Image (cartoon, helix red, strand yellow):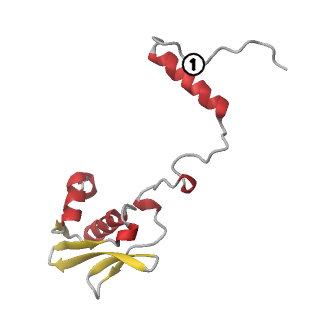
């Protein structure tokens, strides 16, 4: 048994930031692995974003829409293919699955198709337009 006296890892008030960081690192090291599930996992119900979706976005060309089947329903992004352009007209996400980045996944799929087909993306849909304005890197801007 170790009889050496342990130092209190908590920084005293007024301690420099590096000392506080060292104390936090030490406390983390002492408490890991914890019995709680790690953050950003299914166990903690934290969404990882559209890349974590199990369902696949489908381009339903007959109905002119991208679809993402979720449970009994589907999230959709209606579009119009025009010479040199893909117009994103309307995004619809069922109320019971909103907030799970489904609209984002649909917009990203549409941008990917437009890029492969060498079409310009024209966002008429308010959601798609707002998303692309907030994330200009998606269009390479």
- Relative vertical location of residue 57 with respect to residue 140 in this rendering, above or below: below
Comparing 82 with 108, the one in front is 108
Q: Which residue is mark 1?
A: 10
- Relative vertical location of residue 99 with respect to residue 66 in this rendering, above or below: above
Write down the quadrant of residue 58 in the picture.
Answer: bottom left
- Relative vertical location of residue 54 with respect to residue 32 in this rendering, above or below: below
Write down the quadrant of residue 66 in the picture.
Answer: bottom left
Q: Position of residue 15 (x, y in %)?
A: 48, 12
Horizontal side of residue 50 vs 4, given as left or right: left
Q: Position of residue 89 (x, y in %)?
A: 19, 73
Secondary element under disc 1, as helix, strand or loop, is loop
Q: Position of residue 110 (x, y in %)?
A: 29, 70
Q: Position of residue 7 (x, y in %)?
A: 66, 14
The residue located at (18%, 66%) in the rendering is 123
In what quadrant of the picture does the N terminus appear? top right
Residue closest to the far front? 96
Comparing 68 with 31, the one in front is 31
Q: How many marks?
A: 1
Write down the quadrant of residue 126 in the picture.
Answer: bottom left
Residue closest to the far bottom? 62
The crowding category of the residue bearing disc 1, from other C-alpha atoms within 10 Å (few below 14, some 14 to 19, many at least 20), is: some
The residue located at (58%, 55%) in the rendering is 43
The residue located at (55%, 57%) in the rendering is 42
Horizontal side of residue 42 vs 125, given as left or right: right
- Relative vertical location of residue 83 with respect to residue 31 in this rendering, above or below: below
């Amino acid at each position: 048994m170790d009889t050496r006296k342990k130092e209190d890892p908590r920084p005293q008030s007024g301690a420099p930031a590096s000392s506080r960081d060292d104390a936090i690192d030490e406390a983390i090291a002492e408490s890991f692995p914890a019995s709680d599930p790690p953050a950003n996992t299914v166990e903690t119900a934290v969404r990882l974003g559209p890349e974590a979706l199990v369902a696949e976005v489908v381009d339903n060309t007959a109905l002119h829409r991208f679809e993402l089947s979720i449970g009994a329903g589907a999230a959709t992004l209606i579009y119009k293919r025009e010479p040199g352009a893909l117009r994103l007209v309307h995004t619809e996400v069922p109320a019971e699955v909103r907030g799970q980045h489904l609209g984002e996944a649909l917009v990203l799929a549409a941008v990917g198709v437009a890029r492969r087909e060498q079409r310009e993306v024209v966002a008429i849909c308010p959601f798609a337009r707002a998303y692309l304005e907030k994330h200009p890197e998606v269009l390479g801007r």
